[in-house]
Image: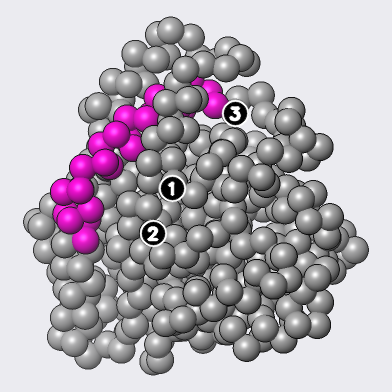
Amino acid sequence: MKREKSQAFFEQAQRSLPGGVNSPVRAFKAVGGNPLFIKKASGCTLTDVDGNQFIDYVLSWGPMILGHAHPQVIDAIQKTAALGTSFGAPSPLEIHLAELVQKFFPLMERLRFVNSGTEATMSAIRLARGFTKRNKIIKCEGGYHGHGDSLLVKAGSGATTLGVPDSLGVPPDLARDTITVPYNDLHTLRKILETEGNQIACIIIEPVPGNMGTVIPKDGFLPGLRELTKPFGTLLIFDEVMCGFRASAGGAQERYGIRPDLTCLGKVIGGGLPVGAFGGRQDIMDQIAPLGPVYQAGTLSGNPIAMAAGIQTLELLKDSAVYEQLEARAAALEAGIHAAAKRAETTIQTNRVGSQMTLFFNDKPVTCYQDALKSDLARFARFHQNLLENGVYFPPSQFEAFFLSTAHTPDDIEKTVEAVYQAFKNSR
Ligand code: KE4
């Protein structure tokens, strides 16, 4: 595979951008080799600057659920941009997207748009602290909620990938207020709440984690979590930035029938443009400025072009046939991966919820962060590089999820399964 142009861009990029990238996990550090620089994308295909084409399962880390450069989304962006790119004042587009989001997430009685998932979770925990007048928060080890200081404690995703789950620069006094528990472990959670529950503002959780790789909630875990928090007045925040629109159209809260107090969204709601959102119970959200004393703001929040991309994306996701197709394609890919593993006499695990999935090089089922850490990272690296050579683009980390879009065809799935089989064989 030719990589000269990507190599040249990577060398040039490192002279202005730390590590040559604008987000660490893109640097390919965990899988070796250097990142590919992308020229264009359409449907489920990425084309890099050397002209190599790949079937894409990163999909910009989730947002591109309709595939890249969907004609109706591009048209909405172009038409809106021609009317002005940013007003710094409210526009009807913000109401339109907010009301659309509420159709998928009706528990978000009030919501606020921001520009990233990080801003959404950072704002949500400040709100929880302001509403409860408590400082401590609980998160799961291996959970990733963006790079807000309080949340970079035993964080997953790129933080684990690069071996910095507890980032330098986070004041120890702040980190001390973040308690971590294992995912899928109600016993530990119960013990902590029983001893200090009345000091804990919130639990923030990926109800279906994707940042330790995808992990499936054990029966009873999410309902138990909800019930455990109530007596202590600890708020339950579902970070559905990734699993929203992936676990189901209404995310994990719809799939598992759980009523969180607050929800954070991102990725899909921007249709590939920078949008995040946090929202939930009106009595809590009314504490947000300008109504209440919890401050939160943003120059480009509710940006008209981003709103237009999100509106068009969610309008198209209202069609139930979309989710029937996503489920069928994701199930076919998962089955194909297991068939390829059997053929290649390779032991793997897969965890899939809806159109979000992870393939683990692991002898045992992965039910939490500690399980995920036992995966064979060297084998994953060789597998990933081999897949690339065979024209398939998986996330460059064992601690990430990959995704399906409505643009992936049965033929793409078939090609992917063959590439996976070759990569199993050649990565031994
Ligand atoms: P952003 O600030 O990256 O938009 O969202 C942060 C975030 C919050 N919550 C969850 C559950 C998330 O998965 C994320 C971001 N996901 C990572 C990929 N695992 C983004 C990719 C990256 O960091 O470059």
Q: Quadrant of the C terminus?
A: bottom left
Mark number, residue 105? 1
Q: Residues within 10 Å of mark 2 (few under 14, many from 20)?
A: some
Viewer-side residue, 377 vs 117: 117
Find the magenta span and give its range.
302-327
Residue pushed farthest right? 173
The answer to if 323 sits in the magenta stretch is: yes
Q: Residue at x 66, y 45 (%)?
A: 283
Residue 261 position, x and y percent, is 59, 56
- Point out the frontmost of discs 2 and 3: 2
Mark number, residue 301? 3
Residue 339 position, x and y percent, is 16, 81
Write down the quadrant of residue 151 in the picture.
Answer: bottom right
* Colour approach in the figure: one colour
Q: Amino acid at mark 3?
A: Ser
Sequence order check: which comes first, mark 3 or mark 1?
Answer: 1
Q: Residues within 10 Å of mark 1 (few under 14, many from 20)?
A: many
The answer to if 186 sits in the magenta stretch is: no
Compared with 205, 319 (above or below) is: above
Compared with 380, 113 (above or below) is: above
Q: Residue at x 65, y 69 (%)?
A: 230
Q: Amino acid at mark 1?
A: Phe
Mark number, residue 254? 2
Compared with 355, 76 (above or below) is: above
Per the image, label 3 sits on a secondary structure element best described as: loop
Residue 65 position, x and y percent, is 31, 46
Per the image, label 2 sits on a secondary structure element best described as: helix
Q: Residue at x 73, y 78 (%)?
A: 193
Residues at marks 2 and 1, CA–CA distance in whole angstroms: 8 Å
Q: Amino acid at mark 2?
A: Glu
The reply to whether the C-beta atoms of the residues labelled 2 and 1 are less than 8 Å apart is yes
